[in-house]
Image: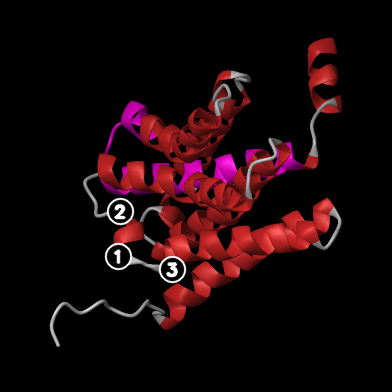
Amino acid sequence: MEQWLVFWKNVSFVDVIEFLGTFAFAVSGIRLASAKKLDWFGAFVVGFVTATGGGTLRDLLLGVVPFWMISSVYVWCTIISMVFVIIFRKKLVHLNGPFLWFDSIGLGLFVVVGVEKALTLDYAIWVVVLMGTITGIVGGMIRDILINEIPAIFTQEFYAVACILGSLLYCSFDYMGVSAPVTQVSTAIFVFVIRLAATRYSWKLPVLKGEL
């Protein structure tokens, strides 16, 4: 009990965002794994990799211990996500809407976590933006590859663009001295809205044509 009290006393707002992002991304991964009829272990692996893949690559590039190796809370978060999908599988597995929402929520929250971590380590702005983008998109890329789907980043251009724009927004707010909670929440909502709007209105980048 005392260990848990110490743990919760040390939890920051960014930690809460990371936990929520882990849950959202794990749900999106497990939901797709269920649609592909994977067994429970396979679904757990897909969910865990979806939730931790981007953050793992980010931490390795930044030269720090991957976040999920420091605390078991991310494993438990994935287990809770799996139980959630099992309980609400009828509403989640056969509908695209819930997947898009959870994936977009995880995307926005993880961009915040990636940017915050890189800023804390005093990296240049271009590195900060890159880390925010990597944290947001890599887990989903690994998820799609594992379930034999084309990664969303290659079919939905604004998947990555939303992360880049969100990272730039965070850096701008931070430079202007906006309070951290406002910056973090605003960035997560911004990425979430951009992702949904791009899907709803089929926003795409111009095609680079090789012929005149």
Q: Which residue is mark 1?
A: 155
Question: Which residue: 55% across, 71% down?
Answer: 194
Total residue callouts: 3
- Measured as percent of width and height from the top left, residue 163 is found at 53, 59
Q: Locate residue 45 relative to residue 110 in the image: left or right.
A: left
Q: Which disc, if any, is residue 158?
A: 3
Within 10 Å of disc 1 (Cα), the crowding (few <14, some 14-19, many 20+) is: few
| Residue type at the position of mark 3 | Phe
Q: Quadrant of the C terminus?
A: bottom left
- Residue at image position (62%, 19%) is 70
Q: Which x, y percent locates residue 111?
A: 59, 51
Q: CA distance from mark 1 to mark 3?
A: 9 Å
Region in magenta: 14-43
The spot of residue 105 in percent (x, y) is 57, 56
**What kind of element bears circle 3?**
helix
Closer to us: 128 or 56? 128
Tell me the CA gap for discs 2 and 3: 13 Å
Report whether 37 appears left or right of 30. Answer: left
Q: Earlier in the sequence, mark 2 or mark 3?
A: 2
From the image, tell me which residue sits under label 2.
Answer: 151
Tell me where residue 29 sits by quadrant.
Answer: top left
